[in-house]
Image (spheres, helix red, strand yellow):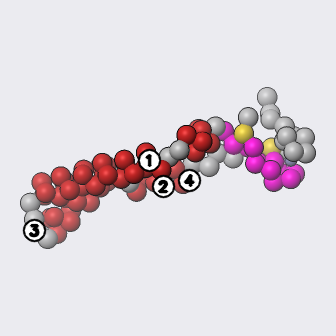
Amino acid sequence: MKPICPSCHSAHVIENIDTSTQGLTEQVLSPKLLIGLGMSVCKYYKINPMIGMVAGSALATVINLAQQRLMQPPLIRAAILPRYLCRTCQHTFSV
Ligand SMILES: [Zn+2]
């Protein structure tokens, strides 16, 4: 069943799931990537890669905690709910 715009009651509604920002954050701040980054930095400066691994995972933990604090319940709900965009009046809504 297609949703109908609550603003103008038009059926010209497209699904508008905005995952671009979320996906980018996960990609950039993934613990795996940070550990890898720490290790390659240490390799480059000829430091024990273990130090880089530890530093990378510590940084990942800090970022994870910061993200959890920043994420307020309404924001999480908005990210999970499917979003729809009305092509008639450009109104964005969720069902
Ligand atoms: Zn509309």
Question: Residue 46, image x and y in percent?
Answer: 10, 68
Q: Are marks 1 and 2 in contact (CB under 8 Å)?
A: no
**Sequence-first disc among 3 and 1:** 3
Q: Secondary structure at mark 3?
A: loop
Other residues around mark 3 within 10 Å, as few (<14) / some (14–19) / many (≥20): few
- Using the image, tell me which numbered label, if any, was put on residue 23: none
**Sequence-first disc among 1 and 2:** 2
Is 56 placed left or right of 15 in the picture?
left
Stretch in magenta: 82-93
Measured Cα–Cα span from mark 1 to mark 2: 18 Å
Q: Are marks 2 and 4 in contact (CB under 8 Å)?
A: yes
- Using the image, tell me which numbered label, if any, was put on residue 46: 3
The one of 67 and 30 positioned closer to us in this rendering: 67
Other residues around mark 4 within 10 Å, as few (<14) / some (14–19) / many (≥20): few
Circle 2 residue: 24
Question: Residue 28, image x and y in percent?
Answer: 40, 57
Residue at 48 percent across and 55 percent down: it is: 24
Measured Cα–Cα span from mark 3 to mark 1: 36 Å
Residue 10 visible, this orientation: no
Circle 1 residue: 69
- Using the image, tell me which numbered label, if any, was put on residue 20: 4
Question: Looking at the picture, which amino acid does disc 3 mark?
Answer: Lys
The quarter in which the C terminus is drawn is top right
Of labels 1 and 4, the one closer to you = 1
